[in-house]
Each structure stands twice: as structure tokens, then as C-alpha cells.
Image: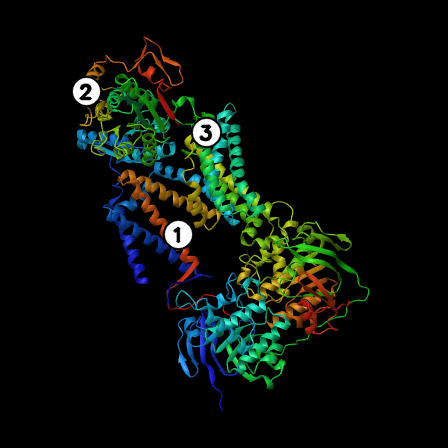
Amino acid sequence: MEPVKAIEMRGITKTFGAIHANQDVDLTVYNGEIHALLGENGAGKSTLMNMLSGIYRQDNGSIVIYGKEVHFTSPKDSIAIGIGMIHQHFKLVDVMTAKENIILGKGKGLFTKNKNLAKEIKEISDRYGLDVNPEKKVYNMSVGEKQTLEIIKVLYRGAKILILDEPTAVLTPQEIKRLFQILRNMREQGCAVVIITHKLNEVMEISDRITVLRKGKTIGTVKTSEVQVPALIEMMVGKKVDLEIKKEKMPIPKKPLLEVDNLYVLNHDHKLALEEISFSLYEGEILGIAGVAGSGQKEICETIAGLTRAERGRIFFEGENIIGKSPRDIIRLGIRMGFIPEDRLGMGLVGSMDIVHNLVLKDYQNQPGVFLKRGPCEVKAKAIVNRLDIQTPGIHFPVKKLSGGNIQKVLLGREIDSNPKVLITAYPVRGLDIGASYKIYDLLNEQKSKGVGVLFIGEDLDVLMDLCDRIMVFCIGKIAGIVNPDEVTKEEIGLMMTGGKEVSLS
Amino acid sequence: MNGIHISKREDLPKKRETVIRILAVILSIVCAGLVIWILGYNPIRVFPSMISGALGTEIRLQQTILKAIPLIVTSLGILVAFKMKFWNIGGEGQIIMGALAASYVALNMDGLPKGILLSLMALAAMIAGGLWAFIPAFFKAKMGVNETIFTLMLNYIAIKYVTYLQYGPWKSPESQGFPKVATFSDNAVLPKLFGIHIGWLIALLLVVIVYIFINHTKKGFEISVVGESRETARYAGMNIATIILIAMFISGGLCGLTGMIQASAVEKTLSANLSGGYGFTAIITAWLARLNAIAVLFVCIAFAILLQGGAYIQISMQIPAAVADMMQGIILFFVLGSEFFLQYKVNLAGSFRKAKEVA
Amino acid sequence: MKKLLVILLVLTLSMTAMAGCGGDTGGGDGGAEDVTTIGFLYIGPITDGGYNQAQHEGYTAVKDYFGDSVNLLYAENVAEDIQAVKTNAINMIDNGASIIIATSFGHMDGMEELANEYTDVTFLHFSGYKKNDTNFGNYFGAMEEARYLSGIVAGMTTKTNKLGYVAAYPYTEVRIGINSFYLGAKSVNPDVTMNVVYINSWGDAALEQAAAESLLAQGCDVLTQHADTSAAQTAAEKAGCYAVGYNIDNSAVAPGSFLTAPVWHHEAYLIPVIEKIIAGEYVPESYYGTMADGYIGLAPLTSLVSDEAKTEVEKVQDQIVAGEYPIFVGPLKDNEGNVVVEEGKALTTHDEIWAIDWVLEGITAIQ
């Protein structure tokens, strides 16, 4: 029997000003299929899906849902027809319970029928294997639970077509497994699932078919079973890309640069954010930190950089205790940090200022006198732009108007340019596409070969395992273990992150 | 779909920006004209009379400049704080405290030579205004106390304290029991240059100084960075608390200097309504100048033209004060409104074009 | 959109152009032959039902008297600081004014500065004490005479023997009024006492009303005020009590409470002095008008006033006008028990009266 076409988008074109976000894009998704929408940042994936969920309207082309052409004027129309979108940023009210969030916005009439609702939620949960306590408040939920709740929410509203925008970005391996199981259950039930991602291994694992977009155009749709990763990459990037992360062996006589000894740190609520943290960072190594978001990654960075006070413990840099030193002094010692927060700008760069002033940011305090000298930084800015191939109209262009990859290059370029001894880098490839990510990994490896001790905080376990010499796993503010990536599996690290098991290796 | 969609603008071509601004001015004039026409005045006479009343003769020009001086100095003070996104609504109080300190010096040390006395008055005023701003800055920096309410409340404390002095300890025995502080001796009065007290020279100098301070010094750079992103400043190793304290001391100091200028050159005494609302007006002018010191100069002059023009037509055309104030209000409404349209984009229902990152 | 823009542009341009032709005729052409432009500065609105209204009645009388030979300007709500006084006065001078009349005490310092800067303009200041030898004089009146007479009315009307006085500032002019009113009441009613509340403002209807209500609550059944509005009279009417007004005849505003009011006849001074100024014969002076001059008056006693009181007032008024009735006659003690006017002495000259810095025994004053 010919499967039912759930979505049929034909010749979709959408422009924003001079930019063609989508150009003559085709996409067909069948019922009972998990369809991956693959592409680099800026390829037009989200724009396409936003048109499907009624947020934008296409300039040209048609959208046919279950055989009927539709003209959405608002997200409400899209929801009404059975399309549910799970965004990267959850749209939940923190102080409400799961149940309250589910009925929110659905409100017809002032009161809701509690009994029916509980029953309905249970029905939906059972059918797809979803598991959420309806009375739990959102602020008490883990990221995985919030995502599950979002899924229940759209299902409760009658969604038969589910769109997920980068759903695995914030999940642990175990949570990803659970999510994939849910998606498979939905497939069994005859739903159509579209998953937007740029993680190739996940695409290979979960999807039935793949549509690849590049620069706003459809490159092609392939069956997952009939395609190999390198071919997909070529479709995405438009050329062959070498995806090997080189890992040089560390020199044998290891000299510790940074020694952290029994560190305790409190967070804003005066609760322990870090406990009993002891480790060494050697020269010429990349030490990775893995952990569920909020396990103390930010605190360890800030404490080493002198931005957060340690409650107890010592940090030695080349034999000298740096606890109590000012951030400024620590920078002078050669410990540099580049932290990429979720909005990419917040902590390292001033968005409205240009590259020069963002370089001045870490330089001006070494200048004598009261006046600001920009000259040296202009020279440096030009050098960095050239060396890292930063795409910008000029060094006097506000950094917030650059693309994500270029912003991150500016940030990392600035830290590397100072010839640091220790480089702390948190989420340096956050939101970057494949090409840009590998450029960053190369930069880190280059630092490593220069003898710099690199502390790398990452999200993607695959990358951590490929890049790092050792991985330190954090679990709720404690070190669950420091492992050699060659000797453990991803799943084992995932378990350690969530407190399942401890592996002690050096 | 119901409602209106408002989103922040990313970019606007210079040409459209100019068109919006011009449109705002024209609309404001048409609207204000309509209102005064309804009230029975001839708008075709009123507007030119306003302009000529502010610029037409030397006397009028002087009057305009006299109003621009305190506005410029205060706006510069507000600018320094706002550059840091520290919402200093306490300009009034800082002006008053500056005037108070200057008056104390003027009344108690009037035996000093003029130059020294005036310098001392200015210094005292800047310290007093600075300290008055330092209090909320301290609580903001150390405890995160909201500065908006804090600075606002300090206005009232300052005004009431001066009222108390005026009615009590500082009441001049020569005024037959009328609550008035004694008049300064001539030594404590700012001299004139080209017919206007030298406050105008001070204001011009300060425009240049503040411009250089914000754009070409390390401290100014720190203030800008703290204003743009506190986290970035922290990660760059800046001592945010110190920066807040210093910037607010400067901000309050400049406002305090306004107090000294007004007390010394205009009122020749201390009074509770000496601040004349400049502390609040300066918020508007600093904002309209987009926190640029050079632009402050021009915006304040334009505003002073509006003030003097309004005062002039009240007299020359015998328009009630309320109507003149209303005209100023309408003009301001449109000009400020255009700033909104320059920064935000408003879409009426139905059209779903969000100027967002193209994803 | 574009069309709208064009229309607006044309509109504005045409407005400006027309105005350009018209020049600045709006600026009252004071320079024309034989027309004297006179500017009045008021501290409040001319419709305040009191002080400023009385001043503006003077303005109107001047206008009626001189007709087309004067061009009158006025500014309301001129604050008592130099900046406000100068801004308004200079704008008037710029519009051709050769006489500036400021009408509140706090306008004095601004007027002094102006007189030094604009020597060809004549400055007249009501209620102040500063003047110079060329172009700056002041004027005021012996309000104590009318106050005393209205005190007689109050003293003979009160049943509780408690009078209430809403006062502006504890300032000499106000104290003279308080004491003379009380002396008038006491002259006919030895048991009378008086409470005074200072509102620390010349005029503020809300403050005046609040003060009046507090006095009524203290058991005062006849109120008067030295403040700019009629709020005390309306408050008294509401409470079923009586009130003596001030500044102008307010019998229509509070017919249920209004007894009489000491009033100003500013035109009695302004008309002759303006004639002198125009004729170039003015010599700065400190004018102090009296009832005899017609500068001070008493509003007609209303039907609420007893015939007895009417007779008493008429009798005393005749003596005052004849100059045979000094108000402040010893022995007088202030409310701290000090003798302020000795037995057998009286305060008769302006300077003696304007040295009063006390309130009399029997008066309770609240700051």
C-alpha cells in the first residue's frame, strides 16, 4: 500500500530582505516515518519548519498537509491541523506543574476538568512510552523531562506531525536513547516525525529518510539505509571534508601546569557547586570535562579564572597558589579563558563593539596611562582576521552582526593570540557547523602542540572522546572519574555523568 | 490574528531613519498646531514666534543659552550613568546637594578671593553631588539594590532637606521671616563672558571632556563595557563594583556642578526648587542624544529653544502657560515616539514577517 | 505613505513661509508711539479666587482706565526664584514692556537684578522692601487696618470664642495680619482665643483646605486666612461655620459662610503711579497705602453679620480713616509672656509695625 503523504512542500521560497533563506525547496514526509532535515547552520532548516508551523508565510510555493493545500496565517492554524513543533528553547512556565503547562493556552472556558485531563495525559503517555509526573513543577525537572513534557503538550493538542528542532543538543546519551525510543513509538503509531539536526551519527541511527539542505536549497532526499556518512557530509558542505580529529600523543615526562587540590565552591544560592575537586592539567594536553549541563562546569572555569571565590581548596599554577589572586593577575600569569554561553556573546565579547575593541577588552589594563590605545589592537585584529579566516566586512564591524562561527573565532583567536600557558575553553563549537567546528578543533590541537594545557568543556561526547587526551566526568559538582577516552565507551561516560557508575583510571 | 507584533529592529537604512525623524517633527508641528488652532490661537503665528522667541534677538538667544547650560551639564552627568545602564533618576537630588554644598561654601567663606571661592564651591558641589549618587551606587554594587527607585527617592530627601534648611537653620534673618536663604556675596557669583555667565564655557568644556572620557580613556571604555554586558566585563577581569562607584561619582558630580552653576550664577542663593526639573529633563535629552556627548550639546540647545520659545509665546501672544506646556509635550511626544519606531518594528496583524535571524 | 508625507511637508512649509512674511508681529509691538507696555508677574493663576485674582483686578482696572494707550501683558505661575522672574520679565521687556510689576514677595531679588540690568525699564514690586533711586520701587498697604475691622466681625460672630487662621508663612506680613485680626476680635470679645496653622506656601487650595478642616476640628467656628485661595471659606461653609475672606469679595463663592473680607484695591496705587511713570515724573518710593487712601478696603458686610457688629465696624472704620485709631496699643504681651508693646505706647509708624516678629498672647500657632 502506498504510504500516506503527511507533508508535501513544493517549491518553497522565502526571502528576508536580500537573503534567500529558502529557494525552491521541496520536502515530502510520509506517515510512519522519521525524516531527518540535515544541513549546516544557515542552510534554511529552521526557516522551512517555521513556515510549516505557521510562524512565517512562504513567498512562493505550496504546502500540502494530508493531501490538502493549507494557508497558515498563524501558529494556531498549524496546531489545529495537527502539526506540533518542539523548539530548541522550551516554551514552558517554570513555576507551573506539568499538567498546568499542558492545558495552558488550550483554555476554552475558565475551568478545566481535572479528571478527564489526568486520564488523557495518561493515555497519551502510555501510547508513546512517555513518562512525566503531571504534578511535578517544571523548575524541578531535568532537561530531558522538560523535553518530554513539551512532546506531551503538542500531542495533547492533537499533533500527528511532530517537528523537533535540534532535540538532542542538550541531552545526555541516556536521555537521547529515551527520546529516540519515544520517536520510534510515534512512528509505530503512524505519526510523521521531522527532526532537524546536524549530528550525523544521530541521523544515521534514528531516521528513515534524510533531506539535505544547503544554502537554502534542497540538495536531495535519500534513504538512510542507502547512504554513508561521508556522502552526507559532502551533500551538506558541498565538498569533501576530512573529519579526522588528529590526536597527537602527549609527551611522556608530563609537567603539571595547573594543580587543583580539594576545591569547594559555592554557587549563588550558597549551595555547594563544586565539591572535593582535585585534578592536574599537564602541559601539552587537552583535558576534557564532560557532564550534564549545570554540573559545575561554569564554576570550575570561573574559579580558576579568579572570578568566583573558592570556599576551600587550592589551585597551583606552576607551583604557585593562585587562589585569592584577582582575575587581572591570573590573566597576566597566562591563564586565559574563553567561555561561549548560550547566546554566544554574553560572557566573552561585547556585541555592539567591533573586533578591535573586543581585543582591547583584554589588553587595555596592561596599557600605561589613562587613555585608551587602539593602535596595537588594530594590528592584532587584522592579523587574527587573516589567520583564522574570519568573514567580516572589516575590523570595525560590530561582532554581534557576524555569524556564530566567526564570533567564536574572534573570541578564541583573542585568547590564543596572547600566547597563554593554560587555555580554558567552554563550549567553543556551540552552534557551529561542521566546517567551523573542525577549524576550532584544529586551533586547539595547535595550542596543544605548543605545550599549552587546554581545559576543554564540551557538550558532544563524540567530540570529547576524539579530541581529548583525558576526560574528567562531572556529576553534580563532583568528579565522577577521570578516564582515558580510548578505554571507555560513550555509554559508560554517560552513566558516570548521571551518577551510575564510577570508573577510576588515570 | 489578533494584535500587533512588535520586534526589535536590527538595521535601518540611514535614509529611512532621516525620513522617520523628519516625519515625526512635521507630525508634531501639525498636531500641536491643530490643538492650538482649536484653542483659538493662530498656529501660523505661534510656531515662527516660538522660533524667533528663542533665537530672534540677542536677548532671546541669551535666554535660550541660559536654559541650555544646566541642561547640558546635567545631561552629561546622566549620560555617564546611562552609558553603564545605571538608571540614575536622581539628577534632581544631586543638583540640589551640589547647590547645597556650594552654598555652604559661599555663605561661610565669602572672605576668600573670588577665584578660590568659586573653585571651592565647584569642588564642594561636585563632591556633594557625587556622594549623593555614590550612596545608591554603593548599594547597587554591593547588594544589587535597584537604583531606579533608590535614586528617585534620594531626590525627595535632598529637596526636603534643603526645604528644612530654608525654613530653619539657614533662614536669612534679613528677609523678615520669609523662608529664604541669604543671598551670596558678589564674590560667590560666577562672572559673565559675552553677556552670559561663564557656565556656557564650562558646559562646552565638559562636552569635550566627557566625550574624550567616554571614548578615549580606559575608564570610559570600562563603563561602556559594563553597560553593554556585565558578564563580559567580569570575564575581562574588570572590577565592576569599583567601576559603578567611580562612574556614579562622576555622574553625580556633574549634576552637582549644575547645582553650583545655578546657585551661583542664577539664583545667588540656595532654594529647594533650584533644580528646576533639569534632573528629569536631562534624562530625555541624554537619551535623545543616544548617549553621545557631542550630540548632547545639540539636543540640549534644541530643547532649550523649545523651553525659551514656549516661555516667549506665553508672554508675546499671551497664551496660558498650560497651552505652551502642552505644545512642548506634543512635540516631545512625537520626537520620542519616533525613537521608538526607529528602534522597534511594528507589524499589524496578518503579516508575519519577523526580522529575526535567518535560520 | 509617501503622499501623506508630501502633504504634511507642504503644509508645514506653507505655515513657515506665511509666518516668515508676517514677521514677528506676534511680539506685541510695544515700540509704537504713545503705547506703554506693562508686564505683570503673578505667583499663581488669575482665577485663584483670592490673591492673584485681586492683583489681576488691578490689571483690569488699569486697562480700563488707560485704554489703548497701554498694552498689558501678564504671566501666571511665576515661581519665587530669580530664574523664573527674569525669564518672564525679560521676555516682556523684549516685547516692549517699559514697566514690570511683580506681585509676590519672593520676586524681590529677581526684580532687583533686573532693575540693575535694564535701567530704562521701571520696576514696581508689591510687598517687598527693596528699591533704588532710579527705576525700582515697592508698594504695599496697611492691611492691618482692614484686618482689625474684620476681626471685630469675627469676634462678635463666634459662639465658641475660638477663631481659626490659615496662614502662609511665619513671616512679618502674615504676623501683622494675625495680630491685627486677633486684636480686632479681642476688642469686642475679651474671651476670644485663636489658633493659627501655617501651610508654608502662599497658595495651595488643598493645603489650605486641610488646614481649615483641622482648625474646624479644633472647635474654631470663624475662620480667616492669609493665603491665596478661597478654600478656607468653602471649608467653613461645608462645616456650617463662618469665614472672613481675604484679598477679594468672595460672598458669591461661599454665601453660606462669608462674613466680609479685607481687600486690596491695587488700582488705587497703580493708576496714578503709571501716569507718573509715563509722564517721566516717577521717583522710586516705598508706598504704603491705607484705608484713607482707598488702597485698602473691607468688602461689604453680608447678611450673616449682626447689626450690632455692623455698627461697631462702621464706628471704628471712621476713626481709622480719620487716623485716630492706632491698631497696636500697649500693653501687649506675646504668646511667650514677653511684653512687646508697653503700656501707654503704640506702634504707629510703618517701620514700627514692620518690626513685628511675635504673635500675641491668646494665639496658638502651629508651624
Quarter of the figure with the C terminus of chain A: bottom right
- For disc 1, the marked residue is B336
Farthest residue in the front direction? A115
Q: CA distance from mark 2 to mark 3?
A: 48 Å
* Residues at marks 1 and 2 touching, judged by CB atoms closer than 8 Å: no
**Lateral position of residue A102 relative to residue C70, left or right:** right
**Residue A496 makes an appearance in the image:** yes
Q: CA distance from mark 3 to mark 1?
A: 38 Å
Three-letter residue code for mark 3: Leu
Tell which subunit mark 1 falls on. Answer: B
Task: Assign a secondary structure to mark 2.
Answer: helix
Image coordinates for residue B76, horizontal then vertical, percent: 48, 44
Label 3 packing within 10 angstroms: few (<14), some (14-19), many (20+):
some
Residue A229 vertical position relative to residue B318 in the rendered view, above or below: below
Image coordinates for residue B247, horizontal then vertical, percent: 55, 44
- For disc 2, the marked residue is C308
Between A253 and C164, the one lying in front of the other is C164
Q: How is the image coloured?
A: rainbow
Tell which subunit mark 2 falls on. Answer: C
**Lateral position of residue A56 relative to residue C237, left or right:** right
Mark linked to residue B165: 3
Mark linked to residue C47: none
